[in-house]
Amino acid sequence: MQNESNILKKLVSGIDDFSIRTKLILTVVSIILVLGVLMGSYLNVVQTNMMKTELNEKGISITRNLAENSVNPILTNNQVRLQWLVKTIKESEPEVVYVFITDERGEVLVHTFSGGFPVDLVGINPAAAGVGTLLLDTEQGFIRDISYPVLDGSAGEVHVGISQESISTTAGKFTRYLLLFVLLLLIVGSNVAYIAGSVVSRPIMELRNSVEIFGNGDLDHKASISSQNEVGQLADSFNDMADHIGYLIKEKEKAAKEVLETRNYLTKIVSGSLDGIIVIDDAGKIEFANEAFIQIAEADESQLIGYDIQSFVPENNEELGSFLATQDKDSTFMKELSFRTRDGRDKSVVVSIAIVEYRNEIKYVAVAKDMTEVKKLEQMKRNIIANISHELRTPLNIMKGYVEISIDETDPQKRNTFLEKSLKALERQNWMIQDLLEIARYDDELEKLDMVKTSINCVVDIACKSFNGKLDASGLDINIKPGQDKFVKADPEKLAYALTKLMDNAMKFTNKGGRIEIGTSQEDEMALVYVKDTGVGIPADKLDLIFERFYQVDSSSTRKYGGNGLGLSIVKDIIDKHKGRVWVDSVPGEGSTFYFTVPYFDDASTNIISSI
């Protein structure tokens, strides 16, 4: 029972999914079928009864006439006449299957059976009370046996078998005609139902299409249904609703656009901030980090989001942890912390944190400023001041000492010696001041390179002559090896100045008796100049640092070699402006070789002046 109920529910649910047009067609077809079955059944019953009555009356009439015509032949025992009567009736009436006559004792006088009288018919359907009828089911189909007495039964009985097959045949034809009529009615009714369903469903389909178009984003679309019936009223209601929804959506989109623009504006501000900005949840986990903080942490965003902020602050994080445990929105935190990157490098970072409430949750917004480079610059500044003070004070003290001695010295030769030493100290200070001025001029872009066609060997010659005999008096083995001369595009004065810095460096770090070689060569499309010495050499880990300003391999106050750390930096600046390259090869304890290259002269360009 439960299964039948479920099947019925599924059937009803399936029918509910049909379209209105389909439902209407099914309804019309069902009505036609039901009416056809009922009408056919009723007409079939009526017709069958009428045919039965008509056939029965015809059979009674035939039997009565035969009984009347059989009286004389029976009384006269005229078998021939009787046989002719029964045979004539059987042959003249197609509905008659058999005819037989019996006497008053029930014995058969004549019959129409060709194979002999059937024993089963003996004594059936007696006509004692008048006309007798009996429906027989035989091999030939249903046969109605009609009996009629002869002379009220005193002379015998007449039996006529009327076939009922004509009724079935006629009923079958009627049924076929009725089915054909019902089929034609179904076709006509289905078409009428389809047309009617289309008329009914068309505005509904238009309304559905309008809903889909509206749902796809066309907020200005309206359902165009002109009828004033229920569907038309529904379309008007839909159009009113669409207008209202469209207005609400446009207002919402406008508000969302404003919010998005504001958010994008704030995002650009946060992303473009040079200071790192992060958002921390109440559990101390990082929820957001801008690009500046990612650079500070030297990590990918995936290595920051979800991680505890205190894992980046290995030292002095108790105060930070205590602040992150409070939820007082008026509290703030600002402190310089030691920040450890994902690569394990320590940085000095100033962190300021404020507490905000967002969606009923406490958030910590932190701004981090990387002070590592500032700290380095401060340390460099202190070193520079100390170096410059030391280097400026040293020649002044030397000059002061030798001048004081010269004043009291009476021997002219010794006095001249002291004054010469004072002059050398003055020259040393002059070189130092010239380096500082060169750096200042370079930074302020007050100088210009006068790029002209010049000989690379000529540049070497200018540099050597600028030492005014100091090379010969240095106590070093100075060897100049000019290669094949080439023309280069350069400022000869500046390029010679850079070479003098390399030569002065070699002389300073090479002990007396050592060897210095200055030479030129060719390298691809560049002229190469080198200064090779047998001095103290440079440690491998310092080779990338020596071209930085104010950098000295030994920066202690008790260092053996003087200098302000500007010479190699000036060399690099000048060579870079010549679109060349400078580098060094060195082995500690064996010496160093400095190289720089300058492009060859291009015949298509002469006397080119460019800013430095």
Image (cartoon, grey):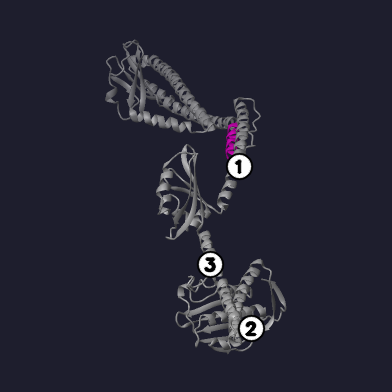
The reply to whether the magenta stretch includes residue 203 is yes
Image quadrant holding the C terminus, namely: bottom right
Secondary-structure class at tag 1: helix
**The residue tagged with tag 3: helix, strand or loop?**
helix
Q: Residue at x 47, y 36 (%)?
A: 360
Amino acid at the residue labelled 1 = Lys
Pinpoint residue 483: horizontal percent, then vertical percent.
59, 89
Q: Residue 97 or 390: which is nearer the viewer?
A: 390
Task: Report whether 118 appears left or right of 309.
Answer: left
Q: Position of residue 276 (x, y in %)?
A: 52, 52
Q: Residue at x 66, y 66 (%)?
A: 444
Residue type highlighted by circle 2: Ser
**Residue ranking furthest to the right:** 607
Marks 3 and 1, the one that precedes in the sequence: 1
Q: Nearer the viewer, residue 424 or 25?
A: 424
- Which x, y percent locates residue 30? 48, 28
Determine contact: label 3, label 2, CB under 8 Å: no
Q: Nearer the viewer, mark 2 or mark 1?
A: 2
Q: Determine which of the numbered discs, if any, sits on residue 257 in the image.
A: 1
Quarter residue 72 falls in = top left
Disc 2 residue crowd, few under 14, some 14–19, many 20+, Cα 10 Å:
few
* Residue in view at x 49 percent, y 24 percent: 35
Quadrant assignment for the N terminus: top left
Q: Which mark is residue 386?
A: 3
Alpha carbon distance from label 3 to label 1 = 59 Å
Answer whether residue 9 is visible to the viewer in this image: yes
**Reading the chain from its start, which is encountered first: label 3 or label 2?**
3
User: Range of the magenta residues?
Assistant: 202-217
Q: Is residue 226 above or below residue 588?
A: above
* Front residue (pair 522, 369): 369
**Of the numbered discs in the image, which one, if any, rests on residue 466?**
2
Of the residues shown, which amino acid type is indicated by label 3? Ala
